[in-house]
């Protein structure tokens, strides 16, 4: 493998391009990341209306929001990241944005289809579209992180990555703010059309306005660069970085809880407080997402300020946030007062989401420039397959399990989840309606409580990361 030596330019001090242009590029990447999470999170927003119409269980909904999306998202992500190590990253992102936006819009066409003698249910059509969204979104974060590392020098990178990471929460905010009212007014299918199609235009603007910087532009002078890094190079480098793996465990647990809770948030609010999709979105989910975005940015900024005296600040700040969020989620999921529920969700989200800035700062900070995209893809492979893939599925399956136990204990063993949802409940006998009123909301509530307790375990692994982080960091 051939190598070259970094030049002696001051890119490691200034970053690529002028300061205003860097800000534009970072904002453009933030917009892309926002679209990423609008499109993946919209399914949860429309759930109170869509789920009864399709007649699917909590387990099936968890499969749609989690594993059905995450499987190919993670599998495709690594080869795309490897491709991004040597190819035009802006081109890759532009194509992927257009693909996932189109597949999001197609979700609105999900309906039962008969081909000859074979009938394909709407659930399977929707699942196929979700898989398509996952394939497209796999080409977003690894090349974006690699671009940010070339535009921003190490001293400014945690703030830049914290700003970029706000896309997770701002995407959720806009999915709720726009998608919720559209669902109430025009139906859940229209919400997919309205929020999916604009991404195609954004993909074109990205390609026309964002420059591809020289790879490794912000590396210190004299840095050795491999011309054609292999995937094995990334694994070999990461094998000697224990802080990367403890951080990955922490981020995976946080994602397991976070994606699971956010996927079922609107359903919880609908069942426990009788809110519509639009009401749950605007009254609760939007302020929670806004608080979470501020918390993400603040953690990155605070870590940068503390890093000179406390090099491990980015890890222990995330650990504190995850651990401290647990009692607030317990409050949110046990109170019968909507305002107290909102308070618990807002504070819990604001203090926990700083882990996003930590996972990206540590994930790319402990490796050399040539394998940053691959390192990010490995991180996201684990985080998304186990965290995003299994979190919603776990909550859904646990909710259905608890529901079945409850209806049996209450003497209505033949009662189904489908019968308790939407207009179907009105057709039940009064005794069965009374059982639904107890088991339908409580089963999901208890599942959410069990899951939110696991945030403390994620916090513990971020504290453990501090043991090796200072030694492992390359970007200093």
Image (cartoon, grey):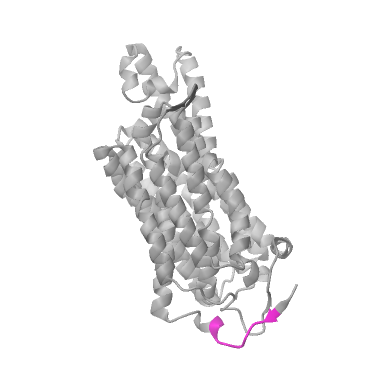
| Residue 232 spot, x, y in % from top left | 73, 61
- Residue 116, above or below 89: above
Residue 30: quadrant of the picture: bottom left
| Residue 334 spot, x, y in % from top left | 41, 36
| Residue 145 spot, x, y in % from top left | 53, 65
Numbered circles on residues, count: 0
Of 260 and 68, nearer the camera is 68
Of 178 and 75, nearer the camera is 75
**Residue at 54% in and 74% down:** 150
Is residue 383 magenta-colored?
no
Q: Is residue 284 left or right of residue 221?
A: left
**Residue at 30% in and 49% down:** 177
Pick the quarter of the image with the C terminus. Answer: bottom right
Pick the quarter of the image with the N terminus. Answer: bottom right
Magenta segment, which residues?
A: 4-12
Q: Is residue 159 left or right of residue 3?
A: left
């Amino acid at each position: 493998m051939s190598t070259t030596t970094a030049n002696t330019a001051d890119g490691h001090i200034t970053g690529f391009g002028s300061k205003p242009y860097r800000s534009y590029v970072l904002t453009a990447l933030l917009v892309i990341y926002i679209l990423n999470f609008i499109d993946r999170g919209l399914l949860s927003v429309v759930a109170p209306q869509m789920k009864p119409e399709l007649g699917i269980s909590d387990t099936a909904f968890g499969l749609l929001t989690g594993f059905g999306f995450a499987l190919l998202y993670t599998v495709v992500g690594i080869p795309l990241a490897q491709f991004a190590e040597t190819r035009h990253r802006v081109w890759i992102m532009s194509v992927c944005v257009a693909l996932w936006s189109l597949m999001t819009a197609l979700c609105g066409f999900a309906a039962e289809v008969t081909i000859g003698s074979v009938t394909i249910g709407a659930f399977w059509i929707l699942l196929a579209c979700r898989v398509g969204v996952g394939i497209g979104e796999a080409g977003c974060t690894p090349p974006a992180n690699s671009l940010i590392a070339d535009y921003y020098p190490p001293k400014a990178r945690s703030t830049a990555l914290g700003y970029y990471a706000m896309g997770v929460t701002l995407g959720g905010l806009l999915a709720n703010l726009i998608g919720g009212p559209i669902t109430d007014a025009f139906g859940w299918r229209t919400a997919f059309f309205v929020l999916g199609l604009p991404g195609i235009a954004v993909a074109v603007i990205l390609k026309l306005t964002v420059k591809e910087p020289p790879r490794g532009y912000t590396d210190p002078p004299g840095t050795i660069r491999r011309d054609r890094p292999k995937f094995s190079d990334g694994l070999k480098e990461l094998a000697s970085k224990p802080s990367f793996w403890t951080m990955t465990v922490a981020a995976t647990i946080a994602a397991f809880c976070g994606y699971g809770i956010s996927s079922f948030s609107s359903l919880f609010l609908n069942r426990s407080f009788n809110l519509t999709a639009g009401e749950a979105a605007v009254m609760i989910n939007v302020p929670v997402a806004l608080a979470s975005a501020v918390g993400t940015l603040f953690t990155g900024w605070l870590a940068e300020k503390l890093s000179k005296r406390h090099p491990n600040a980015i890890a222990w700040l995330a650990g504190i946030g995850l651990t401290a969020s647990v009692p607030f989620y317990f409050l949110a999921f046990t109170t019968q007062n909507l305002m107290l529920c909102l308070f618990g969700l807002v504070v819990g989200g604001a203090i926990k989401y700083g882990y996003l800035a930590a996972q990206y700062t540590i994930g790319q900070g402990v490796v050399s420039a040539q394998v940053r995209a691959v390192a990010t893809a490995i991180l996201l492979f684990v985080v998304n397959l186990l965290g995003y893939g299994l979190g919603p599925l776990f909550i859904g399956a646990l909710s259905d399990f608890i529901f079945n136990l409850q209806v049996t204990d209450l003497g209505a063993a033949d009662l189904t989840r489908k019968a308790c949802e939407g207009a179907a409940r009105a057709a039940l006998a009064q005794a069965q309606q009374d059982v639904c009123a107890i088991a339908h909301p409580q089963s999901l509530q208890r599942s959410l409580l069990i899951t939110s307790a696991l945030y403390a375990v994620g916090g513990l692994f971020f504290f453990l990361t501090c043991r090796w982080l200072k030694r492992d960091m390359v970007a200093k």
